[in-house]
Structure formats: C-alpha cells, structure tokens
Image (cartoon, rainbow, N blue to C red):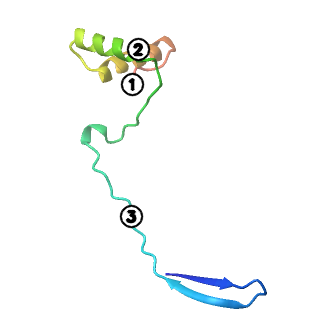
C-alpha cells in the first residue's frame, strides 16, 4: 500500500490519497533439462555466415550447436585449454 501526499506550493497538505498497489511476480519459465546449468553465448555476424553455417550443418548431418561446440573446443585446444564445450 502506498500513501501519496500532495503538498501545495505554500507547504499546506491539500490532498491525501491511499493507493493499493499489488506487485505481481514474473512467471517462472520452465527450463528444459538439456539447458539447465547452461549459458547462452552469441555473436552478431553477417547473414552469409549464418547461411554457410546452416549449409555445413546440413551437409555434415549435425546441428549448428554441435558445430559451434567443435569450433569452441578447437579454439580452447589451440590455446592450451581443456576442450569443455
């Protein structure tokens, strides 16, 4: 509950209003088990990059997610880090 007090220009209280405000909670979304504990990694690329990635995924009969995991693991290994993607 909020109380609003309107004060006139000479300091006198001219009006008091009581406003009931109900706060609503943001609905919780169901996170699929395959995404629990995971974070999104994204970037902005030219549309041709996206198209080429989709074609490669189709040719390799895999997903873009899998191709990105392979690319990240290759990057990690080149930098002497464990392939954890």
Residue 31, given in percent of the width and then of the height, sits at 29, 46
> Closer to the N terminus: mark 1 or mark 2?
2
Which residue in the structure is indicated by mark 1?
A: 84
Q: Is residue 27 left or right of residue 43?
A: left
Please tell me whether residue 23 is drawn above or below residue 35 in the rendered image.
below
> Closer to the N terminus: mark 1 or mark 3?
3
Which residue in the structure is indicated by mark 2?
A: 49
Residue 22, given in percent of the width and then of the height, sits at 42, 74
Q: Is residue 59 visible?
A: yes
* Circles 2 and 3 in contact, beta carbons < 8 Å: no
Q: Quadrant of residue 56?
A: top left
Q: Nearer the viewer, mark 1 or mark 2?
A: 2
Disc 1 is placed on an element classified as loop
Say which residue appears at 63% left-offset and 84% top-offset: 5
Q: Toward the viewer: 60 or 14?
A: 14
> Closer to the N terminus: mark 2 or mark 3?
3
Residue 15, given in percent of the width and then of the height, sits at 62, 89
Say which residue appears at 23% left-offset and 17% top-offset: 62
Say which residue appears at 43% left-offset and 30% top-offset: 41
Mark 1 surroundings within 10 Å by alpha-carbon count, few (fewer than 14), some (14 through 19), many (20 or more): few
Q: Nearer the viewer, mark 2 or mark 3?
A: 2
Number of marks drawn: 3
The quarter in which the C terminus is drawn is: top left
Please tell me whether residue 29 is drawn above or below residue 65 in the rendered image.
below
**In the displayed image of the protein, which residue is found farthest to the right?**
10
Please tell me whether residue 79 is drawn above or below residue 27 in the rendered image.
above
Residue 25, given in percent of the width and then of the height, sits at 38, 64
Q: Which mark is residue 25?
A: 3
Mark 2 surroundings within 10 Å by alpha-carbon count, few (fewer than 14), some (14 through 19), many (20 or more): few
């Amino acid at each position: 509950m909020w109380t609003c007090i309107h004060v006139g220009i000479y300091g006198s209280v001219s009006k008091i209003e009581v406003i009931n405000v109900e706060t609503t909670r943001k609905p919780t979304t169901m996170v699929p088990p395959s995404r629990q504990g995971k974070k999104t990694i994204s970037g902005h690329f030219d549309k041709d990059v996206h198209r080429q990635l989709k074609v490669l995924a189709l040719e390799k009969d895999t997903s873009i997610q899998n191709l990105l995991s392979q690319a990240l693991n290759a990057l990690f290994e080149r930098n002497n880090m464990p392939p954890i993607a």
